[in-house]
Image (cartoon, rainbow, N blue to C red):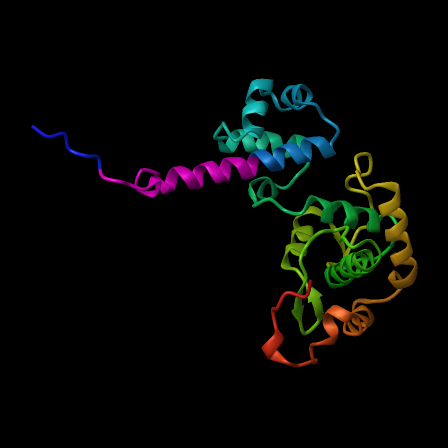
Amino acid sequence: MPIKKKTNTTWEKHIDQNEIDLYKKRLTIGTNIYHWRKYRGLSQSELAKKSGLTQAIISNLEKGEYNPSLDVLTKLSNVLSVPFEILTKSVISWKMLEVVDYILQKLDKLDILKAMKLLYFIDYEAHKTLGNKIVGINYYRWHYGPFNSEIYVLDSIYSKTNNKDFEAKSFFDKNLVLTSYEKKFIDKVLDEYGDLDSVALMEKSYDTEPMADYQKGDNNGMGNLVF
């Protein structure tokens, strides 16, 4: 009796999509816990002790090998002083948070649109001078200038005054990893643009080379990647 040849199959037929989604969620949570633990200056054992968990659980969480319960996430949220939704949100730009936190140490007032434009000018000037962005996020063309909706994560992290301006207090004060050169570069941009409001910054953004090809009010270019 001839041996039947096995038919070629693809991996997709053998992978449970729900299992993949769960794994991605665990990785997201683990990555967030790792970063917030670092920013709080805690070791795994210190975080475990403060949250009433074991170091093994913290280690497995950060590797995406542990599916945390609501109770576990609540404990970690309280110890890390991070809103619950941030721990479970898709991975955000940590460098962006560091830069915003540094800006908040320098300015008394900062709203969403001004923060976005300052980030843009920091990356724009850095790209011209260094060939690389400092913040490292992408900027898209909107009527109010270059923008990235990822900036709205700030609403969940920083408290506000007058329901508009973020409070000028340091969030990652002891654990910023910006280099001294990056800080000097940011200081230079703030010296030039820091006193301007979001409207003035928007106007200036349209004079920059990445935005120069677009015409104000041109919906055809709306949402396009600037750089």
In this rendered view, identify the residue nearer to me: 25 or 210. Answer: 210
On-image quarter of the N terminus? top left
Left or right: where 103 falls relative to 213: right
Q: Residue furthest left?
A: 1
On-image quarter of the C terminus? bottom right
Residue 21 highlighted magenta (yes or no) = yes
Q: Is residue 54 visible?
A: no
| Identity of the residue drawn at 80% across and 51% down | 167
| Identity of the residue drawn at 49% across and 39% down | 25
Q: Total of numbered circles in the picture?
A: 0
**Residue 15, placed above or below residue 155:** above
In this rendered view, identify the residue nearer to me: 169 or 89. Answer: 89
**Residue 57, placed above or below residue 146:** above
Image spot of residue 14 (x, y percent) = 31, 38
Secondary structure mainly formed by the magenta segment = helix
| Identity of the residue drawn at 87% across and 60% down | 194
Left or right: where 35 falls relative to 1: right
Image spot of residue 226 (x, y percent) = 68, 66
The answer to which quarter of the image holds residue 138 is: bottom right
**Residue 35, placed above or below residue 218:** above
In this rendered view, identify the residue nearer to me: 139 or 2. Answer: 2
The answer to which quarter of the image holds residue 109 is: bottom right
In this rendered view, identify the residue nearer to me: 142 or 3. Answer: 3
Left or right: where 213 falls relative to 52: right
| Identity of the residue drawn at 71% across and 76% down | 213
Residue 22 highlighted magenta (yes or no) = yes
Q: Is residue 169 visible?
A: yes
- Tell me the magenta residue range: 7-29
Image spot of residue 171 (x, y percent) = 77, 41
Image spot of residue 100 (x, y percent) = 77, 50
